Image (cartoon, rainbow, N blue to C red):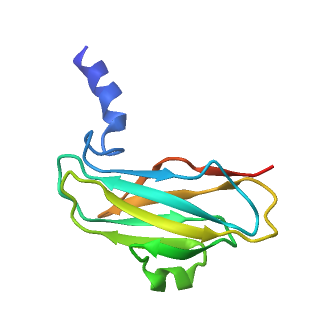
Amino acid sequence: MILTALVLVFPFCGLSYPAGQLEGNRKLPENFSPGKTVTVKLSISAGKSETACTLTEVVPEGWRIVAAAPSYEKEKELLIENIYTWSIPALRKKPYTITYVLEIPWSVRRPKEFSGYLKIGNKNLPLSGDTKLTITE
């Protein structure tokens, strides 16, 4: 009976952090119009721990950030056009917020997907929240 319990628990070890340790969330607007801008909000919370990390956001190809608070690390952006990185200071219970404005090319005609993750040491934690932005009809 003990062996069965270990087998069920073991596959999950190392795949996630303890509840409430570190979480990242993305909030997208409901839709977008080609040639316009949209504002995206990223929230990072550490729960009970104090952890510094890096946030990497992958925006749709051809889209670019025209404003961000706080600023992203530009040297990363120059290597791959649609990947942006922020260094997040050690957090204590209060959430850390990043807001950025994306410029959308006129040529976009389909819904677009976002991805991103928080990096702590050699572990990547995917961001939760919105991942798809649909075009305004």
User: Where 133 sits versus 9, above or below?
Assistant: below
Residue at 70% in and 73% down: 62
In the rendered image, residue 132, in percent from the top left (x then y), is placed at: 63, 50
Residue drawn 22% across the image and 18% down it = 2
**Quadrant in the picture for residue 106:** bottom right
- Residue at left 36%, top 60%? 97
Instruction: Report the front residue among 96 and 80.
Output: 96
Percent x, y for residue 9? Answer: 31, 29
Percent coordinates x, y for residue 73 in the rendering: 42, 80
Q: In this view, does 22 lie to the left or right of 57?
A: left
Closer to the camera in the image, 128 or 121: 128
Please, is residue 111 above or below residue 61 in the view?
Answer: above
Question: Relative to residue 15, is residue 50 depicted above or below?
Answer: below
Going 55% across and 83% down the picture, which residue do you hit?
79
On the rendered structure, is 118 left or right of 2?
Answer: right
- Side of 125 where 101 appears, left or right: right
Q: Which residue appears farthest toward the top when viewing the image?
A: 1
Name the side, left or right, on which 32 lies relative to 55.
right
Q: In the rendered view, would you say 102 is above or below 136?
A: below
Point out the image quarter for the N terminus. Answer: top left
Of residues 10 and 92, the one nearer the viewer is 92
